[in-house]
Image (cartoon, rainbow, N blue to C red):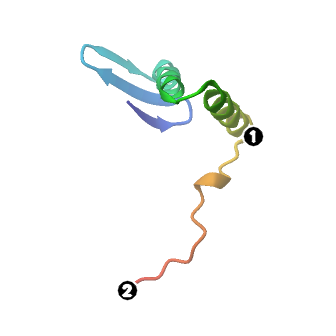
Amino acid sequence: MATIGRNRAVVDMGKIKFQGTVAWFVWMFVHLISLVGFRNRVITFFNWSYNYFSFDRGARLIIRKFQRN
């Protein structure tokens, strides 16, 4: 399983293969189910929903200065 972008993913589980939006939902479902505890699942789901609808990408930024050797 791998996400490729917004609403896009690929799933290859032996004979079962998905791509596109369906694979993206399968990826989300598997990752939510693998979390321990109901509270963690709910918090993660709401964080994903908020980030999806607000286009918030702040957690993905690298803010430290790059120094080349």
User: Residue at the location (31% across, 23% down)?
Assistant: 12
The reply, left or right, for residue 39 in relation to residue 19 is: right
The reply, left or right, for residue 40 in relation to residue 67 is: right
How far from the left and from the top, in percent, is residue 46?
70, 31
**Looking at the image, which is closer to me, 43 or 51?**
43
Residue 5 higher or lower than 59, as above or below: above
- Tell me the quadrant of the picture where the C terminus can be found: bottom left
How far from the left and from the top, in percent, is residue 49?
69, 31
User: Residue at the location (67% across, 35% down)?
Assistant: 52
User: Residue at the location (53% across, 29% down)?
Assistant: 36
How far from the left and from the top, in percent, is residue 44?
63, 34
Q: Quadrant of residue 7?
A: top right
- What is the secondary structure assignment of the residue under circle 1? helix
Q: Amino acid at mark 1?
A: Ser
User: Residue at the location (61% across, 28% down)?
Assistant: 41
Q: Amino acid at mark 2?
A: Asn
- What is the secondary structure assignment of the residue under circle 2? loop
Q: Residue under circle 1?
A: 54
- Tell me the quadrant of the picture where the N terminus can be found: top left
Q: How many marks?
A: 2
Q: Quadrant of residue 37?
A: top right
Q: Residue under circle 2?
A: 69
